[in-house]
Image (cartoon, rainbow, N blue to C red):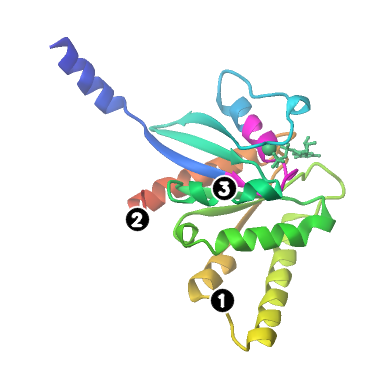
Amino acid sequence: MYHLLKGFHEYLTRKEEFSIIIVGLDGAGKTTLLEKIKTLYNDTPGLDPSKIGPTVGQNMGKISLPSTVLQFWDLGGQRGIRSIWHRYYDDCHALAYVIDAQDRERLSEGWEVFDSVLSAPQILGIPLLLLANKQDSPDSLSVEDIRHDYEEWHQRRLESSRRRYGEDDDTEQRRQRIASLNVIGISALEGHGVRAAVDWLFIRVQNSRREGNGR
Ligand SMILES: Nc1nc2c(ncn2[C@@H]2O[C@H](COP(=O)(O)OP(=O)(O)OP(=O)(O)O)[C@@H](O)[C@H]2O)c(=O)[nH]1
Ligand SMILES: [Mg+2]
């Protein structure tokens, strides 16, 4: 009887788990973000930013929300490590792409990598969030500037592929995705915007499961 009741209680209090991957160029602030999320949502604080080094491989952190557990996978962004990102695409429920809004020189490299993430078929159907990080820095581009810069970059890329191949390689699904792209400004270091980003992901993974896109 005890085991039956225990099993029933576990069934009732069971939380659904969702996996969210965090990608972006090296130095964008992904691990700083993961550790800030842990600090904000867990009893045990995440690592101090001064103790974070470049990620070789991946880090994982879980947070518990009402009836849900979110599992965040922070994947190393160095060029050689990006080739393993695709292994996580099949099992993830949402993706957050972190861009360093302060590093203007690497913006177009960031967009190239973002574009290759967008072109993965597994990513097309899941919630996608662009995070304009380092908003605490006075040199940072705002959310509007970041969106504008990406749209301009994307337009240039389309024109050059039209010139070269005489055709538009953008699919309708991709076009819609870019037009409705969600961008949130954050400071992973200071925590500004981090709760808004987690809330957005939480709501979107729940909704996309209800709409039948759950994995
Ligand atoms: N000013 C400022 N600096 C930040 C912020 N987030 C991260 N940084 C700094 O950016 C640098 C890189 O941060 P990481 O979190 O290691 O970057 P990453 O994206 O995990 O890099 P890889 O592991 O190499 O892919 C560190 O010096 C951080 O302190 C932020 O919101 N504001
Ligand atoms: Mg890292």
Give the residue displayed 49% in from the left and 54% down from the top: 127
Q: Nearer the viewer, mark 3 or mark 2?
A: 3
Element assignment for label 1: loop
Q: Residue furthest top?
A: 2
The mark that comes first in sequence, 3 or 1, is 3
Residue 66 appears left or right of 142: left
Element assignment for label 2: loop
Residue picked out by circle 1: 170
* Figure quadrant, ligand 2: top right
Give the amino acid type for the residue marked by disc 3 in the picture.
Answer: Ile
Residue picked out by circle 3: 84
Residue picked out by circle 2: 211
Residue 120 appears left or right of 131: left
Give the amino acid type for the residue marked by disc 2 in the picture.
Answer: Glu
Give the residue displayed 77% in from the left and 55% down from the top: 142
Residue 78 part of the magenta segment: no
The quadrant in which residue 108 appears is bottom right
Give the residue displayed 59% in from the left and 18% down from the top: 44
Mark 3 and 1 residues: CB-CB less than 8 Å, in contact? no
Q: Nearer the viewer, mark 3 or mark 1?
A: 3
Which segment is the magenta one?
A: 22-36
Give the amino acid type for the residue marked by disc 1 in the picture.
Answer: Asp
Q: Position of residue 24 (x, y in %)?
A: 66, 49
The mark that comes first in sequence, 1 or 2, is 1
In whole angstroms, how far apart are the C-alphas of marks 3 and 2? 29 Å
Q: Is residue 102 above or below residue 152?
A: above
The mark that comes first in sequence, 3 or 2, is 3
The quadrant in which residue 175 appears is bottom right
